Image: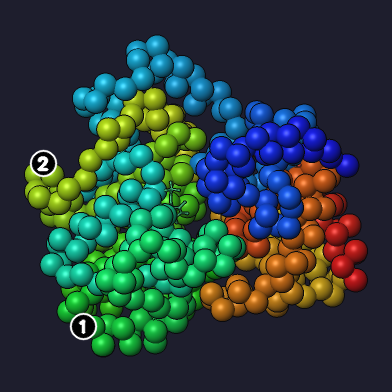
């Protein structure tokens, strides 16, 4: 059993200087009924090591970026090489063009792309661009989808907004909230109603094509094609927020996987190989509205930072090899098939949603197809599971609403250990 004395000491200092002791709320283990989070000292491959020298099989993967595992040799080499040349210039570099080419030439619907420093900036800018292009104000988002922390997207969000039961963040103007219309994922009727009511006021529909911030939910009955068709019909922009799914469900993300083409796409997480990078891209005629070509403002002192770009190039170059995605999916199939067998064997009310190298285990429910289903999953049972795994050396994302991220570094031995522990927990549930 792991001990957490050093983490506790650091936390007691942290809460005096940093709100909640963390710089992103989901890292606060209060969400899983724990008094303080684990502080991480270092990581390699599939392993995290905390300040008490406990080792964990990491299933968070920094919330997505670490698809090639921690401390990947190629990425570190590329970053070291870049570091020798300085860390930031505030002027353009050849490497930014290289990263842009890597993406534009391999993703058919992207003509042009802009880099940002986070996923939040990418979605915020994509929305602004859609509003400018359509000359309309309102947007549709889906309950439980998370698109970062810009004002108009913090209405009924996923991730920690769900975990912490923050329906809408405080500090957002009424007008902003009014311009964000809410629909239900996998519920076509809810989208049709909004379009019929607001018609030519809707600038864009923004969606996580594979929602991953209320647990993993899969699109049903061609839901994504439906969104493509209805946005076209009403001359609205379709934005796929692929900050998680991009380069994760194959190089071309969910758009490629489901063969549905959005007008704009946003990226983050994997694209920076563990450094702060985001991006938004799409059709030339829309993208060329951005300053300095047009008058839609987007900027960033560290946008396209050379170190982050070096990590991004190393990561995406590696991911051009489609075999990586086949192997990742095989790992996911291996673990979820075994877990599903155990669920049957012990006759448990537990279900698993999975795709590519992502999955979520939902306790207390038989199926999860939408936001309402996800809300019904048993938080207390998940929290018990989290603690059991943590104490035995497996780091799950600390919320029932998050996805498990597998990497190329998870070994069969890692997976078998997770299965064994989960079986012990399943037995204890009866
Ligand atoms: C993480 C995430 C974001 C926000 O990205 P940050 O880099 O944390 O700002 C946006 N959209 C989705 C789908 C995400 O998962």
Residue 327 visible in this rendered orientation of the protein? no
Mark 1 CB near ligand 1 (8 Å cut): no
State how far apart marks 2 and 1 are (Cα): 31 Å
**What x and y, as percent, mark residue 407?**
61, 42
Furthest residue toward top: 84
Tell me if residue 65 comes above or below residue 32 in the rendering.
Answer: above
Tell me if residue 23 comes above or below residue 128 in the rendering.
Answer: above
Which residue does the numbered mark 2 point to in the structure image? 292
Q: How is the image coloured?
A: rainbow
> How many residues crowd around disc 2 within 10 Å: few (fewer than 14), some, or many (20 or more)?
few
**In the rendered view of the protein, which quadrant contains the C terminus?**
bottom right
The residue sitting at 13% across, 67% down in the picture is 135
Frontmost residue, 168 versus 94: 168
The numbered disc on residue 199 is 1
**What x and y, as percent, mark residue 120?**
38, 50
Residue 286 visible in this rendered orientation of the protein? yes
Secondary structure type for disc 1? helix
> How many residues crowd around disc 1 within 10 Å: few (fewer than 14), some, or many (20 or more)?
some
| Left or right of 359, for residue 140 | left
**What x and y, as percent, mark residue 302?**
31, 32
Secondary structure type for disc 2? loop
The residue sitting at 24% across, 25% down in the picture is 90
The numbered disc on residue 384 is none
């Amino acid at each position: 059993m792991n001990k957490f004395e050093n983490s506790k000491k650091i936390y007691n200092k942290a809460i005096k200087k940093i709100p909640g002791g963390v710089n992103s709320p989901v890292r606060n283990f209060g969400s899983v009924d724990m008094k303080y989070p684990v502080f991480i000292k270092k990581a390699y491959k599939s392993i995290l090591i905390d300040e008490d020298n406990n080792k964990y099989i990491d299933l968070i993967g920094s919330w997505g970026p670490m698809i090639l595992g921690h401390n990947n040799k190629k990425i570190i080499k590329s970053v070291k090489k870049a570091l020798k040349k300085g860390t930031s210039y505030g002027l353009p570099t050849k490497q930014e063009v290289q990263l842009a080419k890597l993406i534009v030439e391999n993703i058919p619907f992207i003509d042009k792309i802009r880099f940002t420093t986070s996923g939040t900036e990418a979605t915020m800018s994509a929305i602004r661009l859609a509003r400018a292009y359509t000359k309309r104000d309102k947007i549709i988002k889906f309950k439980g989808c998370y698109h970062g922390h810009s004002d108009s997207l913090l209405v009924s969000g996923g991730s920690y907004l769900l975990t912490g039961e923050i329906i809408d963040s405080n500090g957002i103007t009424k007008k902003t909230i009014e311009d964000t219309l809410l629909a239900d994922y996998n519920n076509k009727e809810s989208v049709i109603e909004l379009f019929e009511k607001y018609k030519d006021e809707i600038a864009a529909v923004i969606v996580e094509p594979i929602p991953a911030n209320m647990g993993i939910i899969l699109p049903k009955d061609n839901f994504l094609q439906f969104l493509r068709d209805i946005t076209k019909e009403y001359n609205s922009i379709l934005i796929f927020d692929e900050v998680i799914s991009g380069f994760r469900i194959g190089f071309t993300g969910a758009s490629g996987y489901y063969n549905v083409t959005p007008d704009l796409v946003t990226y983050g997480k994997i694209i920076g190989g563990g450094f702060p990078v985001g991006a938004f891209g799409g059709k030339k005629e829309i993208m060329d509205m951005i300053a300095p070509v047009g008058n839609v403002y987007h900027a960033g002192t560290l946008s396209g930072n050379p170190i982050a770009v070096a990590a991004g190039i190393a990561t995406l170059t590696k991911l051009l090899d489609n075999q990586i995605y086949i192997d990742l999916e095989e790992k996911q199939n291996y673990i979820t098939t075994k877990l599903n067998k155990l669920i049957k064997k012990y006759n448990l009310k537990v279900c698993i949603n999975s795709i590519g190298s992502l999955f979520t285990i939902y306790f207390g429910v038989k199926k999860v197809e939408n936001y309402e289903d996800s809300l019904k999953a048993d938080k207390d049972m998940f929290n018990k599971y989290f603690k059991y795994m943590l104490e035995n050396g497996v780091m799950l994302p600390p919320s029932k609403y998050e996805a498990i991220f597998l990497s190329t570094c998870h070994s069969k031995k890692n997976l078998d250990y997770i299965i064994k522990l989960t079986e012990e927990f399943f037995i204890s549930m009866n």
